[in-house]
């Protein structure tokens, strides 16, 4: 008796679950895709990745307030560069500028150069314009511009964070040497990018 | 390095910010249907609309940076102003054309990034300005959906978000943790600049 009742209940539940309800929702497209595209975009170009990490490492070498001032400056000026791209203002030699950013920032890390804070912020900000102009406007059609932008900015910030984290080894003598070697590598890659841009 | 400003400069800054926030804008948001009723639709709308959510988070971060008193001001004034603006939006017709959410990103993000010293009264003005403008835009959108009940859901969500985020920031003691909050502010500014660019591009 109890088994039959249980079967009836199970069949009843199964019927309700299989019943096709009316779909009230509409398909949303482009939202998550825009964010994920923006989030993954900065990682796709080695020139951008190396320059961002160099900014973080240089900030860690310089210590406070450069440690936070450079990563705060970069995304805001980068967004200005992207804004120029979005409203159709051309910037000459964008690829050359990006290559030079890797070369010069790598050199700064290699030499542990300690300029005045204003100069460091200006240097980082100047190159940020080229990175923003080149990468900030590459939105695939049909995706959300805002979410793409947010993903792009967050990913760039994470690359800076990665650079700062690597730069924490600066407190040890061997770590300082390793960071300078990393700077040399980034500078050499910058020469390679520059060669490619000028060819 | 914290930025200080005189009372006059603070007032001027607030007036400009308020004017920007009051500038009419185009609402690009669409409604979220949860299937759970109008209150949950309102909650879903806020949580799924970064145009509204990010400025609210920025205000909560800023209020938290300014201390518990400022946090309490934002906690109570933002939902009330949002409700007032929302009710006005439900009754009035027509949506403005300028991208105000982008300006909210810029103003709120800049305040967080600069860690600007501001009295609790200033936070109240910001919360009321932000609430009225975004509430109005929400109300205009909710006309076609959950209506006033949706606003109740949004209000409750705002209360929870501001309470949690502000209290978390107030509890931060180590200097580097406040720097992380300021970096988040700079990201919000950058997103706002890009948002303006997309709006101008059309």
Image (tube, rainbow, N blue to C red):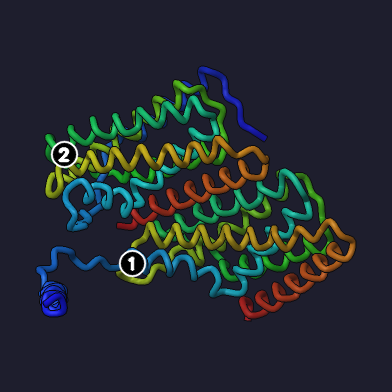
Left or right of residue B198, residue A28 in this image: left
Q: Callout 2 environment at 10 Å: few (<14), some (14 to 19), or many (20+)? A: some
Report the Cα–Cα distance between label 2 and label 1.
31 Å
Q: Secondary structure at mark 2?
A: helix
Residue B47, image x and y in percent?
33, 51
Residue at image coords 18%, 33%? B87
Q: Chain of mark 1?
A: A
Q: Secondary structure at mark 1?
A: loop
Residue A179 falls in image quadrant: bottom right
Give the residue furthest to the right: A173
Q: Which residue is mark 2?
A: B148
Residue at image coords 55%, 41%? B113
Q: Chain of mark 2?
A: B
Give the residue furthest to the top: B8
Q: Which residue is mark 1?
A: A143
Q: Is residue A30 above or below residue B164?
A: below
Along the viewing direction, whichever of B154 and A53 lies nearer the viewer? B154
Labels 2 & 1 near each other (Cβ < 8 A) = no
Left or right of residue B13, residue B82 in this image: left
Residue at image coords 72%, 50%? A120
Residue under disc 2 on the same chain as residue under disc 1: no
Disc number lying in front (2 or 1): 2
Residue A105 seen in the current view: yes
Q: Is residue B163 above or below residue A68?
A: above
Which disc number belongs to residue A87? none
Q: Quadrant of the C terminus of chain B?
A: bottom left
Residue A94, image x and y in percent?
56, 67
Give the residue furthest to the front: A1
Along the viewing direction, whichever of A199 and B75 lies nearer the viewer? B75
Residue A60, image x and y in percent?
74, 54
Residue B16, image x and y in percent?
41, 29
Residue B107 seen in the current view: no
């Amino acid at each position: 008796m109890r088994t039959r009742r249980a079967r009836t209940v199970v069949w009843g539940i199964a019927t309700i679950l299989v019943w096709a309800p009316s779909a009230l929702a509409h398909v949303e497209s482009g939202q998550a895709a825009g964010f994920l595209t923006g989030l993954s975009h900065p990682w796709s170009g080695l020139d951008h990745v190396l320059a961002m990490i160099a900014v973080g490492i240089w900030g860690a070498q310089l210590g406070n307030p450069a440690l936070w001032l450079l990563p705060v400056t970069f995304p805001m000026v980068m967004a200005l560069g992207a804004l120029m791209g979005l409203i159709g203002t051309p910037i000459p030699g964008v690829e050359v500028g990006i290559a030079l950013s890797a070369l010069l920032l790598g050199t700064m890390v290699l030499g542990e150069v300690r300029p005045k804070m204003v100069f460091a912020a200006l240097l980082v900000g100047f190159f940020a314009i080229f990175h923003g102009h080149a990468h900030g406007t590459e939105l695939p059609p049909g995706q959300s511009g805002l979410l793409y932008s947010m993903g792009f900015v967050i990913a760039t910030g994470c690359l800076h964070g990665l650079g700062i984290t690597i730069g924490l080894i600066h407190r040890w003598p061997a770590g300082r040497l390793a960071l300078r070697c990393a700077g040399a590598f980034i500078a050499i890659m910058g020469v390679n990018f520059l060669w490619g841009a000028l060819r | 390095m914290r930025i200080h400003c005189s009372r006059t400069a603070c007032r001027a800054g607030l007036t400009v910010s308020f004017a920007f926030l009051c500038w009419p804008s185009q609402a690009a948001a669409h409604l979220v249907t949860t299937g759970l009723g109008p209150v949950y639709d309102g909650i879903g709308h806020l949580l799924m609309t970064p145009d509204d959510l990010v400025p609210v988070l920025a205000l909560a971060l800023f209020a938290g940076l300014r201390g518990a008193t400022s946090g309490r001001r934002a906690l109570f004034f933002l939902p009330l102003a949002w409700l007032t603006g929302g009710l006005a939006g439900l009754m009035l017709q027509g949506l403005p054309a300028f991208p105000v959410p982008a300006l909210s990103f810029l103003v709120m993000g800049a305040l967080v990034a600069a860690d600007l010293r501001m009295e609790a009264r200033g936070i109240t003005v910001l919360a009321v300005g932000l609430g009225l403008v975004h509430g109005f835009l929400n109300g205009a959108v909710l006309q076609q959906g959950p209506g006033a009940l949706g606003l109740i859901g949004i209000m409750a969500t705002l209360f929870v978000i501001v309470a949690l985020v502000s209290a978390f920031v107030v509890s931060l003691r180590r200097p580097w943790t406040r720097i992380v909050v300021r970096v988040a502010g700079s990201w919000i500014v950058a997103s706002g600049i890009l948002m303006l660019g997309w709006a101008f591009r059309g």
